[in-house]
Image (cartoon, rainbow, N blue to C red):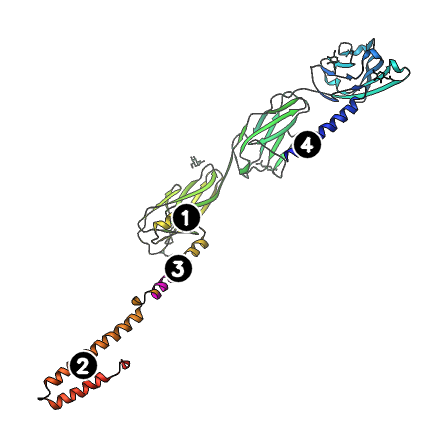
Amino acid sequence: MEATGGTVLNVCSVLLFFFLTEVSSEYIHIPTLVHHGIEGKSLLLSVETHFSMDEVEIQGTWSHTRPSGTRATLVTFTKESSITDMMYRNHLLFREPNVSLLIRKLNPDDEGDYTLDLNIEFHNKTGLVIKEKRTVHVSVDVPVSSPVIEKSPSSAVIEDKANVTLSCSVERGTRVVFQWLRDNIALGPNDRYHFSQDNSTLFISPVRKQDKGMYRCVASNPVSPDRHSRGVELNVYYGPYNLEVDSVQSLRIGEVFTINPGELVFFECRADSNPPNSYVWISTSRNSTQVITEGPRLEVRFYRLAQAEEYLCRAFNNVTQKQDEARITLVVASFGPGKEKHIQDSGSVSPLAAITVCSLFVIGCMLLFFLRRTCHPKRGHFRSRRDHIVQVTRMQRKTSASMNLCLYLGKWNQHRRRAGLWLVWSRFRICTPPSMM
Ligand SMILES: *[C@@H]1O[C@H](CO)[C@@H](O)[C@H](O)[C@H]1NC(C)=O
Ligand SMILES: *[C@@H]1O[C@H](CO)[C@@H](O)[C@H](O)[C@H]1NC(C)=O
Ligand SMILES: *[C@@H]1O[C@H](CO)[C@@H](O)[C@H](O)[C@H]1NC(C)=O
Ligand SMILES: *[C@@H]1O[C@H](CO)[C@@H](O)[C@H](O)[C@H]1NC(C)=O
Ligand SMILES: *[C@@H]1O[C@H](CO)[C@@H](O)[C@H](O)[C@H]1NC(C)=O
Ligand SMILES: *[C@@H]1O[C@H](CO)[C@@H](O)[C@H](O)[C@H]1NC(C)=O
């Protein structure tokens, strides 16, 4: 990219060189066609001649055309002599051998176009007169003095209620161009910024918060570089704006703040305002409004709450007489310090994000629960109970069978009939299929 840029530049300069040589292949060249002269200083209207005076005869004039249109011949010259108009005898100096003209002590009357008419006849080419004509423009200016800035009213103003006028003036200087800067950024007209015809006055109507800043004016003209005035501070009273309540120790969802039981929690109320706001915290629970504390910070500690607590932070700017309020609702519930950390890290969490996180957490818990049940059948409620019952039943059956057998053998003789009945009963029980249980 840079290489191509360089090439283009080179080509350009070569072309320019050819162009210039084309021009300078003519017999005279005037390096500067527009002069910005300074009043009181001298100015040389210089001419380069591309021939040697030895090989030519010349004859010519310098004349002056004022902006009004009046024209006067200043100097008539040949190679040997020059005649300067008597009116300008002390004012002008014709310079041989290169036919330049020096104007001494420029004054505003010297403004206008200066024309050089020149006839050239080469010795080796007698009879052929070459005519050259060039015009140079001259302006005469007074350098600009340091600009002075003024602001009205000089004191601070209230947003939307006041207008501000800034004016810039210079003691000396002609054709002065004014420019305005706020915090070093140039200002242009808009629906609230109005400039006077010459840009020397800036009228702000009405003034706003964003107009606050350091104002400077810059004055310049063709013979002076940018001259900066001193800075003037415009102070605008505004606000409160962007009232916000913040608390790092609590979990926030919209206006609802959840705090850990027993923890000391701070709520910070903040708003943009000039001058700084005064703040009050008001409790609005249980139908009564009550000022709890003055200042931006509210401290609370709750172990439990029967119902949500409602608070109001009110910011008041006593200069603009404007106020703003923010409502919060307080709920006490345990949430881990990890969560607290997370909230603190992520700054303000949107309610939607919080709900999503909670839902995912619940779904995750349910999945875990089911997985554990499926993978550990011993712990499974229904299956373990059933196995247990079957096992116990089998043991009971064996025990009762052997007991009945002993009973039967021991008492066989004495209670034959009864034992027989026992046996029948026992057998019946032994033969009872397990599936009946
Ligand atoms: C013309 O001549 C004057 C006086 O000799 C000299 O000061 C000036 O530099 C010359 N100008 C040019 C363009 O040669
Ligand atoms: C006359 O002299 C000039 C300068 O030396 C030269 O450039 C030019 O070509 C000459 N003209 C003729 C016709 O010889
Ligand atoms: C501010 O200027 C507007 C016109 O631009 C005018 O109507 C208003 O009265 C002015 N306010 C003050 C306080 O001068
Ligand atoms: C005033 O300033 C504006 C830019 O801010 C510029 O466009 C305009 O030409 C200036 N007018 C004068 C008279 O200097
Ligand atoms: C405005 O409030 C500030 C404190 O915030 C106080 O210093 C100042 O005196 C008050 N001004 C008025 C006019 O009440
Ligand atoms: C609160 O106000 C409502 C209606 O405004 C009223 O019915 C209720 O009794 C009030 N409660 C208390 C505690 O004052």
Which SS does the magenta portion mostly show? helix
Can I make out residue 357 in this image? yes
Disc 4 marks which residue? Answer: 7
Residue 47 figure quarter:
top right
Q: Which amino acid does label 2 sit on?
A: Ala
Q: Which amino acid does label 3 sit on?
A: Gly
Look at the image and give the residue range highlighted in magenta. 363-374
- Say the numbered circle drawn on residue 401: 2
CB of mark 1 near ligand 6 (< 8 Å) = no
Q: Depth check: 425 or 333 in front? A: 425
Q: Where's the C terminus, which quadrant? A: bottom left
Residue 123 figure quarter:
top right
Q: Where's the N terminus, which quadrant? A: top right
Question: Residue at 34% across / 63% down in the picture?
Answer: 372
Question: Circle 1 sits in a helix, a strand or a loop, which is it?
Answer: strand
Disc 3 marks which residue? Answer: 364
Q: In this view, does 121 lie above or below 386?
A: above
Disc 1 marks which residue? Answer: 312
On the picture, is 93 further left or further right than 234? right
Q: What residue type is labelled 1?
A: Leu
Question: Circle 4 sits in a helix, a strand or a loop, which is it?
Answer: helix
How much space separates mark 3 and mark 1, taking CA atoms?
A: 37 Å
Q: In this view, does 349 lie above or below 274?
A: below
Residues tagged 1 and 4 counted as in contact (Cβ below 8 A):
no
Can I make out residue 313 in this image? no
